[in-house]
Amino acid sequence: MRRKERAIEDLKEIKKLVADCQVVRVAVNDAEYPYIVPVNFGYEWQGEDLSLYIHGARQGKKVSLIQQNNKVAVEMDTDHELISGGSRPDKYSYGYRSLIGYGEAVVLTDLEEKRQALQVLLDHTVKETNLDSMPDRMVAGTAIIKIKLLTYTAKQNKPMV
C-alpha cells in the first residue's frame, strides 16, 4: 500500500468496514480481460480470517469462470464523501473506506452448507429473514459461492475535522 497513513490495521475497524458495506465487487479471470461483477454478500469471520458468500444462478459466466480458475479478487467500499478544497482545486480529495482482497472461490454443493451460507448472506443483507421455510429444491437451485480470502488490506481517507 503506497499511502501507509491511510491503512486500517485495527481488526475491529476492518470488521466494521465489512459490516457497513452492502456490495462486493468480485473479479475473476477470463480469456482476454478480467470479468468483474458487483454482488450482495454475506460474511463470516474466524479470528482474522474472512470468508464471503455470494449467490446467483447455477449457470452463467461467474460460475463458469470460477469453475475454470478459482482465484479471485474482491473490492468493497463505503463512506463516500467529497472533501472540499475550497478555492484550492489541488486540495480536493474524496473520503472513503475500502477493502481489497485476494482469495479462492468454491461453488458449494452440500445442501446444508448452502442453506447455512444463504442464512449468513440474509443475516447481512435482510437482517430478519429465516430460511427454515425455504424448500430444499429452492436451496439446491441456487448457486452459492464461498470466497475464502487469503489476504486483504483495508484503507481509508477521512475528511479532516
Image (cartoon, rainbow, N blue to C red):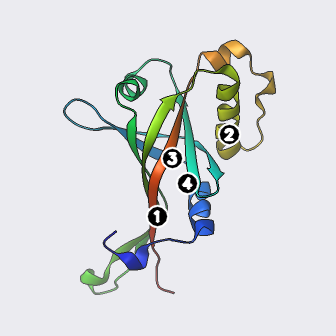
User: Contact (CB < 8 A) between labels 3 and 4?
Assistant: yes
Q: In 3D space, how far apart are the residues under numbered discs 3 and 4 (Cα atoms)?
A: 6 Å
Quadrant in which residue 17 is drawn: bottom right
Q: Earlier in the sequence, mark 1 or mark 3?
A: 3
Pointer 2 residue: 120
Q: Is residue 30 left or right of residue 15?
A: left
> Element under label 4?
loop
Q: Earlier in the sequence, mark 3 or mark 2?
A: 3
Pointer 3 residue: 23
Q: Earlier in the sequence, mark 2 or mark 1?
A: 2
Q: Earlier in the sequence, mark 1 or mark 4?
A: 4
Looking at the picture, which amino acid does disc 4 mark? Cys
> Element under label 3?
loop
Looking at the picture, which amino acid does disc 1 mark? Ala
Residue 1 drawn at (x, y percent): 34, 68
Q: Residue at x 40, y 33 (%)?
A: 70
Say if 52 sits above or below 65 in the image. below
Camera-side residue: 90 or 112? 112
Assess disc 3: are there few (<14), some (14-19) or many (≥20) residues with their C-alpha within 10 Å of its C-alpha: some
Residue 118 drawn at (x, y percent): 66, 32
Say if 80 sits above or below 150 in the image. below
> Element under label 1?
strand
Pointer 1 residue: 154
Front tag of 1 and 3: 1
Looking at the picture, which amino acid does disc 2 mark? Val
Q: Residue at x 61, y 60 (%)?
A: 15
